[in-house]
Image: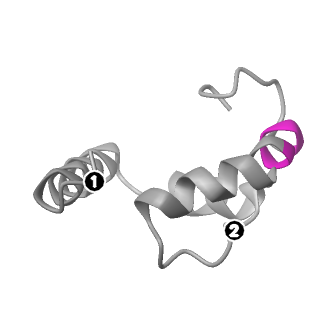
Amino acid sequence: MFVFNVASRREADREMTMPIFIENLKKFFPEIKKLPHNDTLMRLLTGIEVDQIERALIACIQKLIRNKKW
């Protein structure tokens, strides 16, 4: 919601399901078929510690760099 500067998960979901967003996301992650609904993401993220999210983000960025996709 922060990235898209929207007030609701519904608005963010609309942005994230736009064809151009999916197309750009698949350039970085070709194995992605579709994204989960924002309510599902919210439930998942509320149960994860912040440091786990940070470590996962760092690992993802390192993988992108290693694979020369960034």
User: Which one is in front, 8 or 64?
Assistant: 64
Quarter of the image with the C terminus in it: top left
| Pair 2/1: label in front | 1
Range of residues picked out in magenta: 10-14
Please name the amino acid that badge 1 sits on.
Lys
Inter-mark Cα distance, 2 to 1:
23 Å
Q: Is residue 47 visible?
A: no
> How far from the left and from the top, in percent, is residue 4?
69, 28
Up/down of 44 relative to 10, above or below: below
- Numbered circles on residues, count: 2
> How far from the left and from the top, in percent, is residue 36?
69, 68
> How far from the left and from the top, in percent, is residue 35?
67, 66
Instruction: Report the disc number at residue 69.
Output: 1
Q: Is residue 4 visible?
A: yes
Tell me the residue that label 2 is attached to: 36
Tell me if 30 is positioned left or right of 21 in this view. Answer: left
> How far from the left and from the top, in percent, is residue 52?
27, 54
Instruction: Report the disc number at residue 18.
Output: none
- Does residue 11 belong to the magenta stretch? yes
User: Which one is in front, 54 or 24?
Assistant: 24
Tell me if 68 is positioned left or right of 60 in this view. Answer: left
Label 2, secondary structure: give it. loop
